[in-house]
Image (cartoon, rainbow, N blue to C red):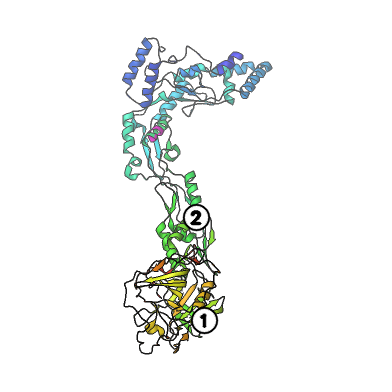
Amino acid sequence: MADESRMTERPKETGHGPFPSGSGEAAGSREAVRRGVSRGKAGRKGRESMASGTGPAGAPADRKEYTKEASMPDTEKKTGAKSHKRPAGKKAGIAAACIAAAVLAGGGGAYAYMAQQYREAFFPNTSINGLDASGKTMDEVKSMIASEIEGYTLTIETGDGRTEQITGSEIGLRPEFDDSLDWILQTQNPYAWLDYQLNPASYSIDAMVVYDEEALDKRIASLSCMDPSQMRPAVDASISEYTPGQGYRIIPEEPGTEIDGAAFKEALEEAVRGLKSRLSLSEAGVYREAAVRRDSPELSERLEALNRYAKMEINYQFGSRTETLGGDRIHEWLTTDEAGNLAVNEEMAAAYVAELAAEYNTSNKAKTIRTSSGAELTVKGGTYGWRINQAEETKQLIADILSGESQTREPVYGQRAASRDGNDYGNTYVEINLTAQHLYMYKDGKLLVESDFVSGNLARGWGTPAGAYPLTYKQRNAVLKGENYRTPVDYWMPFNGGIGMHDAKWRGAFGGSIYRTNGSHGCINLPHSVAKTIYENIQAGMPVICYNLSGTERAGSTPAPAVPAPPAETQPAAPEQPPVTETQPSAPAETPAQPAGPGSETPTPGETAPAETQPAPTEAPAPAPPEAGQSETPAEGGPAGPGSDPGNTGGGPGA
């Protein structure tokens, strides 16, 4: 019984194989059979092999030797038969035990009788090239194979539901047998038949089916599924368009009908050798697949990033109002750079910021003010108000989007104002009625100081322009310089280019109609004490609102109050500041003795005004540098001076 067990496992034999293992000539001959090439040359090689003693007498000279896998017994290496019998294990042991039990029980004669039938027939559960050879003789198996080849048709099923057929006659299909079937029978141990009841065996023998390879190639080329015009490339998986409220999703790849020629021929040859009746191209995997599949990590990463950007929000706060930028707008700006990374279209982001500026900027826009006289007035012109720094805000917006984190913030401002709700100038401001030549300063809604003043000379075209402006800065002990004069002032507060408020100690009166013929270059000349009070309570960026209001004219002027002498040695004398230089062309000098025009007021006797020059209408001089500890410049991020807004520059400083 031990010997029978070894025979069941097909121990190495040396006398039954048609070729010795390792015969190179036999291997080349058998490969020729598989490829369907001419048999003549291979046959000669086979005969030479037999003549040299490398192959057994009677073995087909041109039969290709099969390559056995590592687990294949050496006896299988000597033939073209590939065995797929499952290895004996527990079931084999059970079978042996059953055999022993049968013999001991006196049934040995019946078992031996059954064994004799398998000397000329194949064991039960034996298949050869997919055909059931159980209990059949070698001639019966050959006849069965030949009948399968005769009238053979292979139906090819394409991925789009079409079918085509290749017949055996079109490719010269015919049977050709070597000694592989004989080898299978010779290696059977008849007394091991019961083992095969439990462990089926399967053999694959290529040499039994041959075809004309050239004819097969021509038939393949004639198939409509191989026509390039009929092929449809596979479509890569991709990311969908944005869906409002949902974001993005992955669109799965779409299979195509573009065939890999080499893979198709290999699958076709395998089907023919196995005499298969159908070949599904989809199941055979001969179609070229999409390069990007739905489970691509890169695609998933991109989807995650897109949805993160598209689902975020930027909430802009404008006082009590909120402007929300969400995915429905952001997704339109998402692009891919040259490296395949997500980016934000800068032009689109800038266009959105420009929309915000058009809606929420108040600089250069008219203001409505209830004047101190009780009248409600719309003041046009001037640069005071909120102004978004569009270039910086665009950069910040793009950075926020690429961070993928939602934000709630104010925009980046180039100029700020006092209030976002109601009027933008708040309740602390300087109100200048140019018609009445009267000024008011309010602090936290309460009147702090009021006074007459003298504004720009109308007769010479130097009238002070109306509008709302932010105070540019303030400076102590400035020198106002023009052609033919240098005028020192104690308090200098510019708000519209070179136009500002300052003390005018040389004037003996303020208000009335002095300004019509004996006014300044455009500045607001103030009594010394009023200039001091305003200086001590105003900061850079605070609004200065100038307007004309018909019906508020005043006939008389107010005498200038006495200017108190500074206390002796109470503080170190401040060094003189560099003069505030005027660059405008000069005009005829104004003198106190100039005759007054119609409706004008003669200057108070004893008043001596410094010579003045006309300010340039389009160019503002640079402000004088502030003295350390005595001046104030706009804080970083605070309102910009008028000179920062093109088209709104005023005249230079004038006395």
Bin the neighbour count of mark 1 within 10 Å (Cα to Cα): few under 14, some 14-19, many 20 and up. some
Residue drawn at (51%, 75%) of the image: 532
Q: Residue furthest front?
A: 568
Q: Mark 1 is on which residue type? A: Glu
Bin the neighbour count of mark 2 within 10 Å (Cα to Cα): few under 14, some 14-19, many 20 and up. many
Q: Mark 2 is on which residue type? A: Tyr
User: Residue 279 appears at what percent x and percent y?
Assistant: 42, 37
On-image quarter of the N terminus: top right
In the figure, residue 468 lies in which quadrant?
bottom left
Question: Magenta segment range?
Answer: 263-267
Front-lying residue, 512 or 467: 512
Residue at numbered disc 2: 309
Type of secondary structure dominating the magenta stretch: helix
Q: Secondary structure at mark 1?
A: strand
Closer to viewer: mark 2 or mark 1: 1
Question: Mark on residue 50?
Answer: none
Residue at numbered disc 1: 450
* Residue 497 seen in render: no
Q: Is residue 266 magenta?
A: yes
